[in-house]
Amino acid sequence: MAAHTDKPLNGKIALITGGSRGLGRSMAEHVADRGAGVIITYRSDAAAAEAVVASIRGRGGAAVALPLDATDLGSFGAFAEAVHGQLDTTFSRSTFDFLVNNGGFGHHAPLLETTPEAFDALMGVHVRGPLFLIQALAPLLEDGGRLVNISTGLTRIVLPGYGAYAAMKAALETMSVYLAAELGGRRIRVNTLAPGAIATDFSGGVVRDNADVNAMIASATALGRVGLPDDIGGALSTLLAPESGWINAQRIEASGGQAISA
């Protein structure tokens, strides 16, 4: 049996999009605490991204932050070059091991009131962006590595007003299965991690800051509370660990048992 260690990701490198806050920050810190070097991306808040980098470095880890606009497909080539440069100068590597597509935003409106502009924006960030970013970064992803696309519990749990957002994530989940088949020859595992309701600033912080919404979700969750960022950071780092290497082409929900039947 493989030896267990508190640093099972030593020598690995993870690239996590949207790593400057919320779930992305927790993922980056958990993965770094388990020994991996981390590249995070941010869209506009460089100060928040650098705070994450400083946190990881202060705990003895290695991290860098790079800007990325997931809607600007024309910038992906230059972004891949920037990643390659950081791999060389910061990590003395030419490839990285884990790609986590986490960046994105929510949208709350009934489907019959969703505008074409909102639909296109969601599509750009949650479906089109991840696909073409994967294309751009695939040559840098180590054979035998991992690709994790972050989805949502809302592809299973129906809450009014989240139909368009959930539809995009459902497309991402389907794309993950096809990518697992296409990348299997390189021994790259591809999975979807689907968080339930988490207390972050997502969707205006409604789960975190609205006591009634928080209590409603907690009452509908088997473990009796809403999720916290560290619940998802821990789940991701476990999914990337060597012991999870036989998990492939799966949707893994981390929701504490939200909206399940007894």
Image (tube, helix red, strand yellow):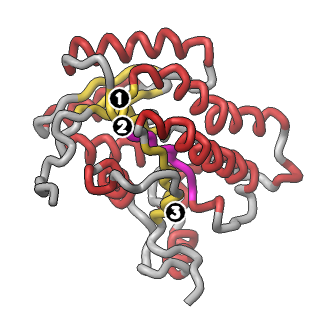
Q: CA distance from mark 3 to mark 1?
A: 30 Å
Identity, as a three-letter code, of the amino acid under mark 1: Glu
Residue position marked by numbered label 1 in the rendering: 142
Secondary element at tag 3:
loop
In the depicted structure, whether residue 98 falls above or below residue 206: above
> Is the residue marked by circle 2 packed among few (<14), some (14-19), or many (20+) residues within 10 Å?
many
Left or right of 94, for residue 82: right
Q: Is residue 197 magenta?
A: no
Q: Name the element at disc 1.
A: strand
Q: Residues under labels 2 and 3: Cα distance?
A: 26 Å
Q: Residue at x 36, y 31 (%)?
A: 143
**Residue 21 occupies which quadrant of the picture?**
top left
Front residue of this view, candidates 24 and 168: 168
Predominant SS along the magenta part: strand
Is residue 149 located in the magenta-colored stretch of the structure?
A: yes
> Can you give x and y, in whole percent of width and height, for residue 88 in the image?
25, 13
Query: Depth check: 67 or 80 in front?
Result: 80
- In the picture provided, is 124 more to the left or to the right than 151? right
Q: Residue at x 50, y 63 (%)?
A: 253
| Residue span colored magenta | 144-152
Q: Which residue is mark 2?
A: 145
